[in-house]
Image (cartoon, rainbow, N blue to C red):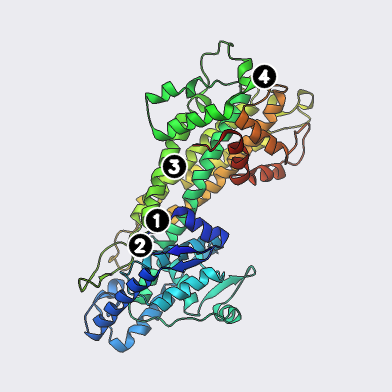
Amino acid sequence: MSIILSGETLSIEEVVRIARHRERVQITETARANLQKSRDFVDKLVADGKVVYGVSTGFGQFKNVVISPDQTATLQANLIRSHATGVGAPLSEEAVRASVVVRINSLLRGHSGVRQTVIDRLVDLLNHDVYPFVPSKGSVGSSGDLAPLSHIMLVIMGEGEVIDGGRRRPTAEVLREKGLGSVALMSKEGLALNNGTSVQTGVGTLAVYDAMRLAKTFDVAYAMSLETLMGTLAASDPRVHALRPHPGQIMVASNARRLCEGSQIMESHKDCGRVQDAYSLRCAPQIHGASRDTISYVASVVSRELNSVTDNPLLFPDDGVAISAGHFHGEHIAQVMDFLKIGVCELANVSERRVARLTDSALSEGLPAFLIPKEQGGLSSGFMIPQYVAAALVSENKVLAHPASVDSIPTSANQEDHVSMGTIAARQAAEIVGNAHQVAAIELLCAAQAADFRAPLRLGRGTDAAYRLIRSRVQFMAQDRILYTDIEAVAALFPNELLSAVEGAVGVLD
């Protein structure tokens, strides 16, 4: 089944399905009619000799240079060729696919002036698994993602390179092998194709989707650590959170109660007299909850951007006008990606603090030092170094979390005198999410080891499901062994397998 694109209904989940699971796309007939109307309007502007930015003029500082009608096609091709100047490692295939579908969806609204055949060539990239070579660095986030989008658009022109079988190859060769055609750009089309926020939005969409799923995983890790550190659920009492009703906080507290329901470990010390837990346990609903609310807000902004027109000038065929404006400016995405960075950083930060407690015998309520049997202590280091790794990851995240959006370096001889750096923010957000994923794996690995030392007492219904899944892939560590493969094995379990196992036991988590 194909995902239907109209320009107005694309969701975060659909972008993920197209980008990661290679689902095919189709265009609605209404969208095609909108494309034709806007294209007819561009052709009329050219025929009437109207001076419109990017249609009959140069770009940036060259905005006042009028281009003759017989040079408009050359103008558009030159725009793409000259702007394909990215550097660095290529964007992943899923990031490129996400960027392509976001660009298609924006153009379908019928305010950009591209022909249907241009859209069809972009659809070919998705439906025939053509992976344009797109260097990851070089966009300042406005005017749109000029450099990375130009690398994509070279490919529909039959130029540039694609990645095929893990190596860079000339586009023309690959298109010929796949039986696909290219397109010669006409007036306005080059500018419509590379002047938008589609790369930062595509990369950001994948990052916020992963963050939404990862937040649930951190709740599972927190609940398992809470139990094995002999903590209490008192701080997750619903009466408490009714007095400070932030939605994310309420969700995390609810998840903790459900995950730990039926815990023999918690039952064993309910009358121990301890007054309260450390902040990394007691305040987890507030910390995780704030991150949950951050992620939710970011998702709402990204969802709007997915269905927005983000190039310039904007065409209004029904009104007979073309308006130069600033929708290519990536400030919305830049700021929310910086916000996402902070939210995910905090999930990892507090997770590392729980790992530190699990491995510190002075704080772990009777667990052996570094979670290795006492008779092995000294001879074996146990889980000493995974805590170092978690510390390194969260420290790196703190550097990456510096807001990209507060920086601006003017471009195009100061015509473009404020830029967003949104693409940098989106790439950093994705990297932070990846680092946080590994921190969550380390916490789950340590908490599972701690649970074995609490045997024969059982974990709660949800945490026990997580524990059993982990133990199906990684065994208890009685003495030192190579641990990086254990971390990899646990990291590979989530979000899908881990959440499936846990939610199968307690129902869908909030």
Q: Which residue is mark 1?
A: 422
Residue 292's image quarter? top left
Q: Which residue is mark 3?
A: 342
User: Which element carries disc 4, helix, strand or loop?
Assistant: loop
* Cβ atoms at labels 2 and 1 below 8 Å apart: yes
Q: Position of residue 102 (x, y in %)?
A: 43, 62
Q: Position of residue 225 (x, y in %)?
A: 60, 29
Q: Nearer the viewer, residue 345 or 381?
A: 345
Q: Position of residue 233 (x, y in %)?
A: 53, 22
Q: Which residue is mark 4?
A: 366
* Cβ atoms at labels 3 and 4 below 8 Å apart: no
What type is the residue that disc 1 sits on?
A: Gly
* Whether residue 139 can be seen here: no
Does residue 287 appear left or right of residue 329 in this picture?
A: right
Q: Position of residue 160 (x, y in %)?
A: 51, 76
Q: Earlier in the sequence, mark 2 or mark 1?
A: 2
Q: Earlier in the sequence, mark 3 or mark 4?
A: 3
* Whether residue 175 can be seen here: yes
Residue 351's image quarter? top right
Q: Which residue is mark 2?
A: 142
Using the numbered discs, state the Cα–Cα distance from disc 4 to disc 2 in whole angstroms: 56 Å
Q: Is residue 353 above or below residue 491?
A: above
What type is the residue that disc 3 sits on?
A: Ile
Using the numbered discs, state the Cα–Cα distance from disc 2 to disc 1 in whole angstroms: 8 Å
Q: Nearer the viewer, residue 217 or 340?
A: 217
User: Which element carries disc 3, helix, strand or loop?
Assistant: helix
